[in-house]
Amino acid sequence: MLNFVYDNKTTLIFGKGTQHEAGALLKPFGKKVLLHYGGGSIRRSGLYDAVTASLKAAGVEYEELGGVQPNPTLPLVYEGIRLCREHGLGLVLAVGGGSVIDSAKAIALGVPHEGDVWDLYLSKQQPQADPLPVATVLTIPAAGSESSPNTVITNEETRRKLRYGSPKLRPVFSIINPELFFTLPHHQMANGVSDMMSHIFERYFTRTLHTDLSDGLCETTLRTIMRNARILNGNLHDYDAWAEIAFSGNLAHNNLLGVGREQDWGCHAMEHELSALYHVDHGAGLAVVTPAWMKYVSPKHQGMFAQFAVKVMGVEGSFREPDALIREGISRLERFYRELGLPTTMEELNIKSGDFPLMAEQAISVRGPIGGLEKLDARDVQAIYRLACE
Ligand code: NZQ
Ligand code: ZN
């Protein structure tokens, strides 16, 4: 196991009715806030009314900025920065999913930053000034941004989708009420499940030895996600299944499962190029890239992938024949994605193989070869994209 420091400052307020506590929870911050949200789901569901009523009841003043689109982009971030500076706002309250929360974090980062906030995404330097605090009311369990230190923003002009991380960006609190997920369309449930599973895969597949505890936590969390996703597949109004999924999705990306072990993140880097060029949903892109990546790297890491097949996918067989175990494990994962209606090939996403060279170059352009388990250069990435066509 590697040395680690684990510090997660996000307070979780989990359960039924908790959205009504937003105002009271914000009050101690004593500041005017920016209420940030997406394209309209919170108005249709009544969540907008509930949150604004709770702010008013607690005497919390706010300005608002809606319109965050999935795969959030820079112009709205700049607008949010301008609003915060103009009105002296001291906290960003994100009511939405990963896209809204990431946009809120970018605004929080940009307000005290001299210069263009996008430069931080390019340089990866830590911020010189403390970002504004961010708080969230989560409406889709998926990206884990509600307690992660990361934000992912797309620059449409340069067609780049980049991640930026700083411990200072973990939200101060996140409200997670599984009842708020009842209004999600089926495909967003599936996207969320794919994303949170990938957050665990990126940590689970490692070169680090003696990681028994976190291996076991990863395996239990993956099995919990799959079991409850199958329940939601038949009934999107099952509170207990959403609660299990939401708790798992948070654990999947608050990094407790990733401490003490080298992490991978190759699939996320490869997927971000799909989203940047083709605007595909992040979870859908991951369902296409992940099995292809597994097929490509597993021959060199048979022990890990046989363990995955047996302990996560429930394959029975002998560890003396790892090839068969691994083949069946990956095939069961693909079948699970398809059961949820997710795509598993590039064709289903209408992605043209002619773009693979550009996407592969871009995937490695920020930090060089990607991936922790196997270092992947542009040739490897292209080979994986091609495997995802089969
Ligand atoms: O915009 P509205 O109208 O709210 O609709 C949203 C959006 O269209 C809708 N939705 C959300 N909650 C709903 C709802 N519809 C009905 N009922 C509800 N309760 O769902 C759509 C997708 O929302 P989005 O926020 O885009 O989904 P998600 O949470 O999957 O976030 C995806 C983004 O997060 C990034 C991804 O790259 C992507 O840009 N990620 C962020 C990470 C992080 N910050 O740590 C890590 C992840 O790996 C990921 O990269
Ligand atoms: Zn993700």
Image (cartoon, rainbow, N blue to C red):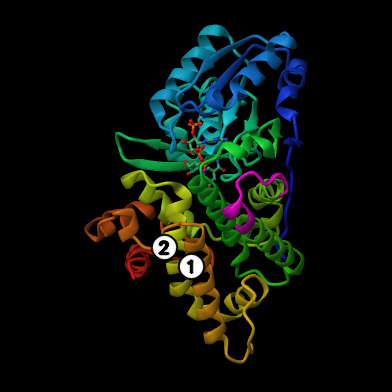
Position above or below: 10 against 318 = above
Q: CA distance from mark 2 to mark 1?
A: 7 Å
Viewport quadrant of the C terminus: bottom left
Q: Is residue 384 left or right of residue 18?
A: left
Identify the secondary structure beneath mark 1: helix
- x 48%, y 26%: residue: 40
Query: Is residue 365 something one can see in this rendering?
Result: no
Q: Which residue is mark 2?
A: 344
- Nearer-the-camera pick, 370 or 144: 144
Q: Residues within 10 Å of mark 2 (few under 14, many from 20)?
A: many
Q: Is residue 113 left or right of residue 175?
A: left
Is residue 238 magenta-colored?
yes
* Residue range of the region highlighted in magenta in the rendering: 230-240
Label pair 2/1, CB-CB below 8 angstroms: yes
- Residue type at mark 2? Thr
**Quadrant in the rendering for residue 223:** bottom right
Q: Is residue 93 left or right of residue 330?
A: right
Q: Main secondary structure of the magenta part?
A: helix
Give the numbered dot on residue 334: 1
**Quadrant in the rendering for residue 301:** bottom right
Sooner in the amino-acid sequence: mark 2 or mark 1: 1
- Image coords of residue 327 (percent x, y): 50, 80
Identify the secondary structure beneath mark 2: loop
- Residue type at mark 1? Glu
Would the CB of label 2 be found within 8 Å of ligand 2? no
Position above or below: 367 against 47 = below
- x 56%, y 44%: residue: 143
